[in-house]
Image (cartoon, rainbow, N blue to C red):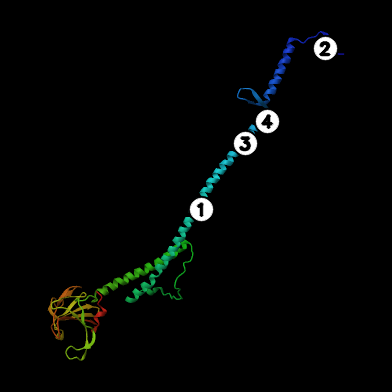
């Protein structure tokens, strides 16, 4: 049988008791530091509930919470970026659709312009046909042919290709226009020598050609036109020329004749007064004389004739001004 300290008369010393107390306190403090507590307290200050958590569990929960918040933050940032990219993509899609519509409209207009410019070929051909071909224009020596449709379909092609086709057509028509400009420059010189203006303004009493004679009633050939004009009406030159007749001229009475060059001459008969001299050079619109009733005439008028290579022609073919 073991004797207790009390029975044997032994008692722990004061230092031993103090050591045991300190050890107990350290154990309690260590235990308390190893855990966290959550208290739920009412409004009057009385504790209701207490939850104790191990330090490691609390640290793990805190780390997990921090990681979760970070992950959610990353997801939220990615979502915001994705939303912004989606909005930009929608804007880009609308812009691309508008640009595509603009390109298609431009392509269509280019095709129409090319077709319009191409139609100028016929107009150029008609103008050049009226004045004759230009020297050197046939140097290309290319035979062409084939059927043509009533309307060329506007095929869907790339804008760059349509621009190239339009550029080629415009270049071709530009060459044609320059050729036409040279042709018209030469034609203008020739037209300036043609008696295209009426020498006096008035109705025509007798046309060019066969007619009953005012004196014998037999059919005769009238080599000019008789233009109604009161006595003393000014007669003007229809084109530039040189005076080759200025005075009496048999049945024409007092007359003036102009030589316009290019084998073209004009005659003005039955005049009352002459205002130019033989050999004088006149310009278009120059005052030549005044109408009258001299020579073989039944009344005041102007007899007007045009000679080409010495043969009388119908003045109506030259009068357009």
Q: Mark 1 falls on what kind of element? A: helix
Q: Which residue is mark 4?
A: 57
**Residue 109 in the figure: left or right of residue 308:** right
* Cα–Cα gap, marks 3 and 1: 38 Å
Residue 133 at least partly seen = no
Q: Residue at x 40, y 70 (%)?
A: 119
Dividing the picture into quadrants, the one containing residue 13 is top right
Mark 3 and 1 residues: CB-CB less than 8 Å, in contact? no
| Residue 235 x %, y % | 17, 76
Q: Which residue is mark 3?
A: 67
Label located before the other in sequence (1 or 4): 4
* Cα–Cα gap, marks 1 and 4: 52 Å
Label located before the other in sequence (2 or 1): 2
Q: Mark 2 falls on what kind of element? A: loop
Q: Nearer the viewer, residue 162 or 229?
A: 229
Q: Residue at x 72, y 13 (%)?
A: 18
Q: Residue at x 50, y 51 (%)?
A: 92
| Residue 302 x %, y % | 17, 80
Q: Split into 4 quadrants, where in the image is the C terminus?
A: bottom left
**Residue 153 in the figure: left or right of residue 56:** left
Q: Which residue is mark 2?
A: 4
**Within 10 angstroms of label 4, few (less than 14), some, or many (20 or more) residues?**
few
Question: Which residue is farthest top?
Answer: 9
């Amino acid at each position: 049988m073991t004797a207790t300290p009390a029975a044997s008369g032994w008692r722990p010393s004061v230092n031993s008791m103090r050591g045991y107390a300190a050890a107990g306190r350290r154990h309690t403090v260590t235990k308390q530091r190893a855990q966290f507590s959550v208290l739920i307290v009412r409004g009057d200050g009385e504790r209701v509930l207490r939850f104790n958590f191990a330090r490691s569990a609390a640290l793990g929960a805190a780390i997990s919470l921090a990681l979760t918040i970070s992950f959610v933050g990353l997801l939220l940032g990615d979502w915001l970026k994705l939303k912004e990219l989606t909005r930009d993509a929608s804007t880009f899609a609308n812009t691309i659709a508008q640009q595509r519509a603009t390109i298609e409209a431009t392509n269509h207009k280019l095709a129409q312009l090319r077709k319009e410019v191409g139609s100028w070929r016929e107009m150029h051909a008609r103008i050049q046909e009226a004045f004759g071909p230009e020297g050197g224009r046939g140097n290309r020596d290319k035979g062409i042919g084939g059927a043509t449709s009533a309307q060329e379909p506007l095929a869907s092609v790339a804008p760059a290709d349509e621009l190239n086709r339009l550029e080629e057509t415009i270049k071709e028509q530009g060459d044609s226009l320059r050729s036409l400009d040279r042709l018209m420059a030469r034609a203008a010189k020739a037209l300036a020598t043609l008696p295209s203006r009426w020498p006096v303004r008035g109705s025509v009493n007798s046309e060019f050609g066969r007619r009953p004679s005012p004196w014998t009633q037999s059919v005769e050939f009238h080599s000019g036109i008789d233009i109604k004009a009161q006595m003393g009406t000014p007669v003007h030159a229809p084109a530039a020329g040189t005076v080759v007749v200025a005075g009496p001229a048999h049945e024409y009475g007092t007359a003036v004749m102009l030589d316009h060059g290019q084998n073209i001459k004009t005659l003005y008969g039955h005049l009352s007064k002459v205002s130019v001299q033989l050999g004088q050079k006149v310009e278009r619109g120059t005052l030549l004389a005044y109408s009258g009733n001299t020579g073989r005439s039944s009344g005041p008028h102007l007899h007007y004739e045009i000679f080409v290579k010495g043969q009388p022609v119908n003045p109506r073919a030259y009068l357009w001004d």
